[in-house]
Image (tube, helix red, strand yellow):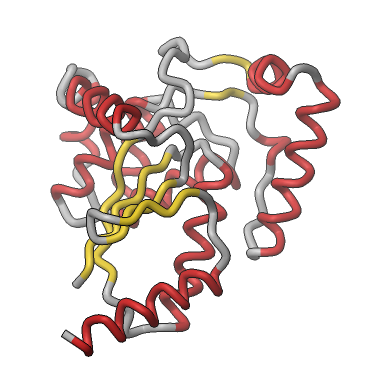
Amino acid sequence: MIKLDILSDPICPWCYIGKARLEKAMEAEPDHPFAIEWHPFQLNPDMPPEGMDRRQYLEAKFGGKENAVRVYAEIDQHARDEGLDIDFAAIKRTPNTINAHRLIHWAGIEGKQNAVVDALFKAYFKEGRDIGNSEVLCDIADSAGLDAAVIGKLLASDADVDNIRQRDAHSREMGVNSVPTFIVANQHAVPGAQPTDLWRKVIGELRDQQAAE
């Protein structure tokens, strides 16, 4: 297997789109060599713990309502092209995602990372749930087969907060400044939500390389 590390934030629509495109490629190439691990990268590391009103956040980020609407109309079209039905109107708050990243980390220990990442994207983008809220995260953990009571206790503590922040900071020091970023075999960084056809080409090249070796 070849390691595919994915740096992502569960409130990043391009990360959701990028995941869908990669998975279409893997479904089309079922003998793909990828072993996937998800890693933390906070789009808003300075977000207040309680999050903030989403409209206020987007208008500040994109310099006003018109720009925010324009940018998100484009994102919405790309999402629909991939069969992702995002309900942006349902999202009322932009959360701080450090606890969501802790949950993804703990899910990795249990071998359930992909299920939790899927559930976080669905909760945020399709259901408009606040994935900064511990009760919501416990519910997501339960749906993915994790022990919600254990997750609740961990979320109530500072467990792995420093771990997540240090990994995030390390990625920035290595030059990562946007997500999604995919790192193939600890060597090649592939930034952005790349098209399915590009991933199929990468998979083919990796298979040929493995066969030659």
Q: Is residue 32 above or below residue 140?
A: below
Residue 153 showing in the rendered view: no
The residue sitting at 47% across, 41% down in the picture is 179
- Residue at screen point 22% across, 82% down: 210
Q: Residue furthest front?
A: 212
The N terminus - image quarter: bottom left
- Residue 184 appears in the figure: yes
> Is 62 on the left or on the right of 27, as rendered?
right
| Image position of 170 with respect to 212: above or below | above
Where's residue 129, x and y in %?
53, 34
Outermost residue, right side: 66
* Depth order, front residue of 36/184: 184
In which quarter of the view is residue 202 placed? bottom left
At a point 70% along the width and 46% down the height, the residue shown is 75
User: x%, y% of residue 176?
Assistant: 39, 36
Is residue 26 shown above or below 176? below
**Relative to 66, is 192 above or below?**
below
Task: Give the side of residue 31 with respect to residue 149, left or right.
Answer: right
Q: Which residue is at a point 50% across and 43% down the rendered structure image?
A: 123
x, y percent for residue 212 = 21, 88
Residue 155 or residue 54, whichever sits in front:
54
Which residue lies most toward the top here? 48
